[in-house]
Image: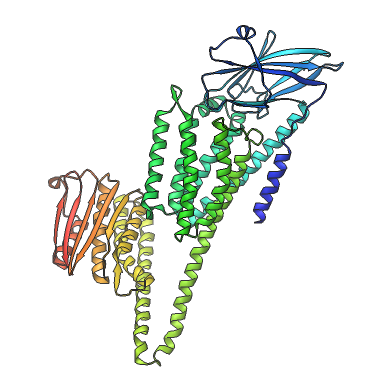
Amino acid sequence: MKIIRKILIIFIIFLSTSCLYANSSLSINKASIFIDKLDLNVNQIKSQEFKQFFNKHQNFGFNNKITIWLKIEIKNTSNIKIKKILDFNNPLLEEIILYDNSKVYKSGMLNINLGRTTINPIFDIEVPAKTNKIYYVKINNTTTALQFSMSLDDKNSFLKNDLKKQFFIILFIGIILAFLTYAIVLYFYAKDRSYLLYSLYIMFLVFQQLTYVGFLPLYMPMWFTQIDNLIVVPKVGLVIITGILFARSFLKTKKYKKIDNIYKFITYFIILQIIFVSSPYFYIPEITVLTGLFFIFFNLYTAIYVYKNGNKQARFFIVGWCFLIVGFFLSIIDALGIYSVMYNFPSLVLILTAIEALFLLLAFVDKLNILQKEKDIIDNKFLNELHQRNTIVEKEVENRTLMLKNLYKELQHRVKNNLQIMLSIIRLQSNKIDNEDAKEQFLKLENRIKSIAKTHEILYLNDDLEKVDMYEYIYSLSEDIEMSYLKDIEFDIDTKVSIPLKDAVYIGIIINELITNSMKYSNCTKISIYLKQNENNLHLYISDNGEGYDESKVNNKTLGLKLVENLVCSQLKGTISKNTKNKCEYNIRLKL
């Protein structure tokens, strides 16, 4: 809470620096506007009818079909020549041309000269004593919202304000990068993919915001700015896509198929937008903006939904996302030309991004705390069971069943620990080997042992010590194998079977071998696993959506396939049939 309080104080200080300075001796006497749809030159413009505008901020939304012309009359009522800064409060305006009689001056994001040090495009204005001067200004913008406000400022005051603005941008970027570094460290410590996806999301978000506040155009080479100006839609799209990947991982949306499918649909829709509506020839950024608007509210709904369904880790996610929604929503309605707020507070989204990054990081810390508490509960429970064992012998016969249950649970825990020790030894040995084939064999061996260890782990954690819940077992086993091969595979698991430990171990080894083959040798994206029980008969069905293979050209006597065949036919007295045309499909029938 102390960190949040400091951030709010900094935010208030930043807002206090946004006031503009003016001098009563030199002022804009009249400003009028003309919307040019014919690409006229300055001589033709002088004969056009300009309309005076009274709103300080002008917002035309995304509109690359028009050119804005301003006619500005500046009056100097003093007896001395006065110099001022004409400031256009939008760093993303691509080209601004000032016509001062025969002199022409250029500014804007695509016309930043080496001497410019300010975020906003500016012009030096010099008006002789007792003089009225008329300037014509041409404004073009093709990729971002065509909006601006204009002011006449004292140079020293303006530069001081701009320096403060840049200082606070650097400050908040530093805060966000600190959060980012911490998240990366947590990723290597916890091996949780959510931390890595969070880091990618924050990087793309910061990249987009640094352009939005005018920081990148000011300090990066012109070739970079020109490219950056052309990839507005891809940049926003990547922010949304990485945000989706992070939310799916952190909120564990695979448990909620409808929600997860909506996330997938948004991802594919964004990819299509990047391909088809982001080129200069066919440019419709409004679609991406509206998609982003839907995403931010859907993400909040999802976080609240999973929180209500027992995922307590989502609470900080909800708070952090609420802050970002405020900034994104104001930016979106500002970009669409609906209502202009952001021009007074251009760094608001960056500030809210820093607050969001803080709360998302707190969500990670909270997640670790929850897991630690759960571990402490399990450890305390285990210690209590050990303490009670000394008195169980003295109890009556009816209490011996409970004692045996605790001993059996402890046995599963110890077996699992011994298997974990074996896995650690295998990993250490594998790390010392450079031969890739040998490493592959060690990985296969590791996954086989994991398939056995999982059964003992499930029996230890669940109340039923006699039978293994096969859905939980297969789901956990498939996730481990997926992480081993660093692939993103969709698993369709359908089973409500619970079977004894011995049979579960055999089934786990068979499933491990078959889905390992699919991941390694086919280009599949989905694997289906169905396990049904009818009295003492088991039916196991495994298939992928890969390209299949020609059995006559493949060695079917590899260790993995031999192991499957031996377990099914010899050990379990079952049958196996397969179809490898256009896919890999296995039907296995067993008797318990």
Residue 527, x across and y down, in percent: 27, 51
* Viewer-side residue, 66 vs 522: 66
**Which quarter shows the N terminus?**
bottom right
* Viewer-side residue, 430 vs 334: 334
**Which quarter shows the C terminus?**
bottom left
Q: Image quadrant of residue 362?
A: bottom right
Q: Residue at x 78, y 13 (%)?
A: 132
Q: Image quadrant of residue 340?
A: top right
Residue 136, x across and y down, in percent: 67, 14
Residue 518, x across and y down, in percent: 25, 50
* Viewer-side residue, 209 vs 184: 209
Q: Residue at x 37, y 92 (%)?
A: 396
In the image, residue 412 sits, relative to residue 446, either above or below, namely below
Q: Is residue 91 left or right of residue 189?
A: right
In the image, residue 1 sits, relative to residue 521, either above or below, namely below
Q: Residue at x 32, y 49 (%)?
A: 489
Residue 218, x across and y down, in percent: 62, 29
- Is residue 461 visible to us here? yes
Looking at the image, which residue sits at the far right?
79
In the image, residue 202 sits, relative to residue 148, either above or below, namely below
Q: Image quadrant of residue 91?
A: top right
- Is residue 182 visible to us here? no
* Viewer-side residue, 304 vs 484: 304
